Image: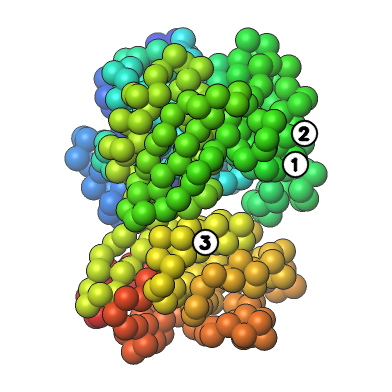
């Protein structure tokens, strides 16, 4: 960690500059710095709404493009986004000027988490929903939590809060930290409580194999303080193994008969999911939440386990769940036109695609379910999951697959084939189509969509604003 050797974060920081400010996390950090009374500037490529609007409304100056002069005012601290490389012209200027610098998790930990109980949500899947739920439970409890979450919480209409309370909720991301620190972000946090939802292979641009991913989570789990609590999902064998190796208090959650926290009597009555929770074999409470799918109820159960450890009552948790409005881009109904529902979701990993579609099926068992998928992440644009995706679409009635964008950035021999996925799905008896671009998908959907269809659109990007364009034309 080069900057930890050569550049300590100064004690008195008044002016901070963020390189690659328009990312979800960096934009949130900029907003937090501004609320804390600092002078904030930043730079990025492709500065556009909604992040540009969000930042400018808060009086934060953003420079378009990366240039040496953007740091010529010699800020007290530069925060470097993990998308930025050493050969970035602004980074070079920062190093030439010997400006103090750090990564996003270092800044978050130093300025906003320090002195509070860190509630860290980790795992390959479910981090954003679980973090948002926990933050809302704490807010309903009057604890004014600090938080940084990877999606916009509708209850707050933002993805961060500085908070005056004793706790800070943060997504423990396993992605690398910065060009000068290739370790996972979550190693910068010292949890008082942590949740581990799942461990699967992902981020093929960072990790070589599942064992490499597992090692990162092992490092996180084994570094937890003895007095901390780790809550782990009992249905994932790697999670249960890692939980057993933690030096701290542990509790499993899920459907396992021996797990301290269990889901029981689950049933769906849209827009609600209903379920009972038991704690060490005894009834804890009956709850309902406006969330689809078994996987989301497991996220809720993990939050209940942590909330209980924080001394919050079942009645308070019940009230929080009932008033939770969800997260933008997570099972978000974007609109209904002529009886056709359009839902937006962030799913991209095969497991997430499978669980998201299964969740929609549980809420809409008698509707035609149309899956629209854009493989956009660094992993999904590679062929590592080529053979796993076909089974992920089992519950869909019709599937539309877009050609991966920015495929030229992936070596030819490693590229994912949307055409092959469509062929594989058709071989399984599924109605499936390949499309070279988003326009062709919209044209096709407008032609075939009919009343009572549920169109579930899955991507980790904006997908060329397909949701609004489709709703306008239906």
Name the residue tied to disc 2: 241
Does the rendering let one see residue 248?
yes
Quadrant of the drawing holding the C terminus: bottom left
Mark 2–mark 1 contact, CB under 8 Å?
yes
Which structural element holds mark 3?
A: helix
Q: What percent of the width, then of the height, locates residue 88?
A: 53, 46
Q: Which of 247/56 is in front? A: 247
Q: What percent of the width, then of the height, locates residue 425?
A: 62, 80
Above or below, 168 against 377 in this view is above
Label 3 neighbour load within 10 Å: few <14, some 14-19, many 20+: many
Image quadrant assignment for residue 249: top right
Between circles 2 and 3, the one closer to the viewer is 3
Q: What percent of the width, then of the height, locates residue 222?
A: 73, 23
Image quadrant assignment for residue 149: top left
Name the residue tied to disc 1: 237
Name the residue tied to disc 3: 358
């Amino acid at each position: 960690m080069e900057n930890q050797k050569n550049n300590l974060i100064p004690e008195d920081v008044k002016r901070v500059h963020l390189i690659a400010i328009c990312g979800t996390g960096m934009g949130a950090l900029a907003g937090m710095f501004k609320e804390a009374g600092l002078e904030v500037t930043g730079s990025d490529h492709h500065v556009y709404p909604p992040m540009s609007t969000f930042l400018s409304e808060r009086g934060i100056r953003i420079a378009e493009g990366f240039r040496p002069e953007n740091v010529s005012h010699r800020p007290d601290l530069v925060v470097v986004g993990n998308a930025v490389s050493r050969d970035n012209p602004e980074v070079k200027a920062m190093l030439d000027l010997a400006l103090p610098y750090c990564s996003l998790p270092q800044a978050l930990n130093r300025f906003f988490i320090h002195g509070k109980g860190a509630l860290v949500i980790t795992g390959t899947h479910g981090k954003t929903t679980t973090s948002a739920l926990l933050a809302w439970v704490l807010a309903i409890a009057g604890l004014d939590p600090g938080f940084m979450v990877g999606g916009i919480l509708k209850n707050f209409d933002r993805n961060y809060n500085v908070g005056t309370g004793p706790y800070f909720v943060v997504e423990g991301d396993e992605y690398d930290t910065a060009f000068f620190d290739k370790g996972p972000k979550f190693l910068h946090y010292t949890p008082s409580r942590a949740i581990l939802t799942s461990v699967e292979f992902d981020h093929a641009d960072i990790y070589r194999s599942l064992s490499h991913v597992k090692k990162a989570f092992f490092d996180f789990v084994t570094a937890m303080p003895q007095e901390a609590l780790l809550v782990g999902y009992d249905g994932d064998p790697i999670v249960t193994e890692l939980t057993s190796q933690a030096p701290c208090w542990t509790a499993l959650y899920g459907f396992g008969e021996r797990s301290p926290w269990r889901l029981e009597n689950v049933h769906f009555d849209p827009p609600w999911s209903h379920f009972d929770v038991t704690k060490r074999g005894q009834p804890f409470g009956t709850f309902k939440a406006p969330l689809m799918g078994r996987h989301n109820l497991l996220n809720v159960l993990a939050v209940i386990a942590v909330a209980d450890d924080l001394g919050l009552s079942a009645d308070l948790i019940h009230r929080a769940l009932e008033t939770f409005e969800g997260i933008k881009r997570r099972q978000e109904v974007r609109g209904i036109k002529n009886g056709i529902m359009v839902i937006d979701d962030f799913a991209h990993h095969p497991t997430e695609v499978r669980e998201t579609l299964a969740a929609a099926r549980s809420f809409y068992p008698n509707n035609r379910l149309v899956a629209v998928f854009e493989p956009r992440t660094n992993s999904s644009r590679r062929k590592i999951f080529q053979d796993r995706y076909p089974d992920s679409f089992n519950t869909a009635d019709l599937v539309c697959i877009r050609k991966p964008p920015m495929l030229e950035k992936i070596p030819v021999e490693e590229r994912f084939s949307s055409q092959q996925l469509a062929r594989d799905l058709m071989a399984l008896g599924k109605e499936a189509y390949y499309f070279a671009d988003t326009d062709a998908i919209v044209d096709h959907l407008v032609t075939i969509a009919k009343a009572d269809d549920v169109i579930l659109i899955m991507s980790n990007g904006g997908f060329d604003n397909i949701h609004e364009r489709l709703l306008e034309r239906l």
